[in-house]
């Protein structure tokens, strides 16, 4: 295979990833009879187009994010994992803080877990998050943005929400994601969500993402923000250790819920 064109070699690399989920530079160098420098260049080029995830001495396969069912159905899926993630994320919330909580099934479970906190102010664009916190009015003040209702997600989007958000400052932002990896960043398949989410990210520098293992290493159609925008990632014990290590190596604090 020493005389393969670059395009042929890269196609074979992608086929190897489909079969094995990961490849290493030394193994590919031996297989194609070419230098490790050339292989690393191939992997970097493929990573730049989102076709793989670059890793130490190799690469991992990008797994497309599956279509998401409505949020009311997703809450019941992997409920135990979501509850573990929510409990682990509680250590990042201090009594007396102002925080923003985004939409999603994990975020609704997280909101319910906040009932143990005191003197919180919670801003949200998620109707189900507001509903979960409505019974805690003695300790938690809930502020809901305006906007157009996205029924499937029970979230509020659009220019009304985007005009409201800059008027608010919070200590921390807690968000769920559909897909995130280091190469493609945080992505979604719902285009109208992008502008509102980007405006949310302007509310505070500290972004904490709650995402179970199925969301990591995946990629969707529309780019929201780089993975490096996250200060912390809270996930579950079924997360791929290699992906966890990659996030940590990039400077992101990763909390793995193991209880």
Image (spheres, helix red, strand yellow):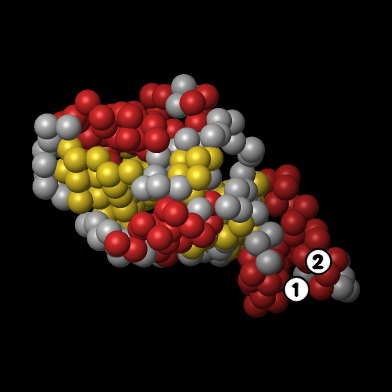
Question: Residue 250 sits in which quadrant?
Answer: bottom left
Q: Which residue is mark 1?
A: 34
At which x and y percent is residue 136?
Answer: 19, 29
Seen from the viewer's position, the closer of residues 109 and 82 is 109
115 versus 225 height, above or below: above
Q: Is residue 174 left or right of residue 162?
A: left
Q: Nearer the viewer, residue 64 or 32?
A: 64
Residue identifier under label 2: 9
Q: Which image quarter: residue 48? A: bottom right
- Nearer-the-camera pick, 240 or 227: 227
In percent of width and height, residue 16 lies at 74, 52
The foreground one among 256 and 139 is 139
Name which residue lies at 64% across and 65% down: 47
Taking the image as shown, residue 114 lies to the left or right of residue 185, namely left
Give coordinates of residue 139: x percent, y percent: 12, 35
* Residue 143 against residue 128 in the figure, above or below: below
Q: CA distance from mark 2 to mark 1?
A: 10 Å
Tell me, yes or no, whether the two marked residues, 2 and 1, touch with CB atoms within 8 Å. Answer: yes
Quarter of the figure with the N terminus = bottom right
Residue appearing at x 33%, y 29% in the figure:
131
- Residue 117 falls left or right of residue 164: left
* Of pointers 2 and 1, the one earlier in the residue sequence: 2
> Which residue does the image show at 43% across and 58% down from the upper left?
162
């Amino acid at each position: 295979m020493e005389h393969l064109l670059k395009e042929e070699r890269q196609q074979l690399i992608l086929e190897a990833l489909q079969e094995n989920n990961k490849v290493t530079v030394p193994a590919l160098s031996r297989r194609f009879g070419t230098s490790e420098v050339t292989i690393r260049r191939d992997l970097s080029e493929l990573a730049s187009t989102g076709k793989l995830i670059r890793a130490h001495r190799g690469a991992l396969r990008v797994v497309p994010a599956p279509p998401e069912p409505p949020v009311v159905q997703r809450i019941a899926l992997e409920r135990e994992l979501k509850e573990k993630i929510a409990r682990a994320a509680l250590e990042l919330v201090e009594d007396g803080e102002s925080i923003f909580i985004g939409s999603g099934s994990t975020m609704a479970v997280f909101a319910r877990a906040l009932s143990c906190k005191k003197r919180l102010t919670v801003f949200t664009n998620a109707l189900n998050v507001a509903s979960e916190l409505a019974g805690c009015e003695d300790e938690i003040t809930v502020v809901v943005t305006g906007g157009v209702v996205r029924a499937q997600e029970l979230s509020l989007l659009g220019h009304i929400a985007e005009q409201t958000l800059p008027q608010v400052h919070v200590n921390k932002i807690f968000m769920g994601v559909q897909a995130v990896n280091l190469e493609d960043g945080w992505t979604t398949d719902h285009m109208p969500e992008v502008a509102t989410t980007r405006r949310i990210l302007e509310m505070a520098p500290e972004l904490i993402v709650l995402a179970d293992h199925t969301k990591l290493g995946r990629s969707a159609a529309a780019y929201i923000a780089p993975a490096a925008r996250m200060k912390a990632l809270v996930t579950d014990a079924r997360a791929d250790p290699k992906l966890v290590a990659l996030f940590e190596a990039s400077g992101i604090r990763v909390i793995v819920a193991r209880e």
